[in-house]
Image: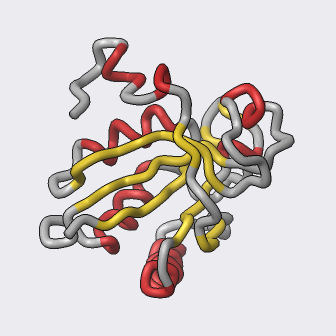
Amino acid sequence: MSEKATFAAGCFWGVEAAFRKLPGVEMTVVGYEGGTVEHPTYEEVCSGETGHAEAVEVTFDPDRISYPELLNAFWQLHDPTTPNRQGPDIGTQYRSAIFTRSPQQEEAARASLARAQSRFRVPIVTEITPGTGFWRAEEYHQCYLEKRGLGSCH
């Protein structure tokens, strides 16, 4: 039976493409999580006033890829030590976050953060919080890089 996990690691386009390539990942959806507005638009999220992060919801087969393996990929996909920034993208919507869906995911995420910290000279600033509701982004954001000829989307 499939499970879901939600990660924020900067602009969701590249994060989605990277997760989608992992064996055992069945589907990815980009959207918004962690804010206070229901059904936010991209423009609202970019304003920084909704509190949402650009996030990727990953549907995966736990018999093929484990949640801890997804966490390991998450730490490698971005710089979790830069608050509200990934590369040239600046703002709270680009923060590093893990939105958990169960106490087991939260426990695994916190243990993974502790292990990942040993690889960085400065503190990891990734938020680990229970998911409050994932809002699917507009269709033109889904599989964005693939639509630009940079890969294939399932």
Q: How is the image coloured?
A: secondary structure
Residue 123 % position (x, y): 66, 69
Q: Which residue is at the far top? A: 148
Examine the rendered structure and indicate whether residue 63 appears above or below residue 85: below
Q: Residue at x 31, y 21 (%)?
A: 146
Count of labels in the image: 0
Examine the rendered structure and indicate whether residue 50 appears above or below residue 99: above
Examine the rendered structure and indicate whether residue 81 appears above or below residue 124: above
Q: Which residue is at the far front? A: 38
Residue 26 % position (x, y): 22, 50
Q: Residue at x 67, y 50 (%)?
A: 95
- 122 or 84, nearer to the observer: 84
Residue 15 % position (x, y): 43, 42
Q: Residue at x 36, y 13 (%)?
A: 148
**Image quarter of the N terminus:** bottom left
Examine the rendered structure and indicate whether residue 136 appears above or below residue 23: above
- 77 or 40, nearer to the observer: 40
Residue 13 appears in the figure: yes
Left or right: 70 in relation to 1: right
Residue 118 appears in the figure: no
Residue 67 lies in what quarter of the image?
bottom left
Residue 42 lies in what quarter of the image?
top right
Left or right: 8 in relation to 143: right
**Image quarter of the C terminus:** top left
Left or right: 91 in relation to 142: right
- 84 or 59, nearer to the observer: 59
Q: Residue at x 35, y 58 (%)?
A: 73
Q: Which residue is at the far right? A: 49
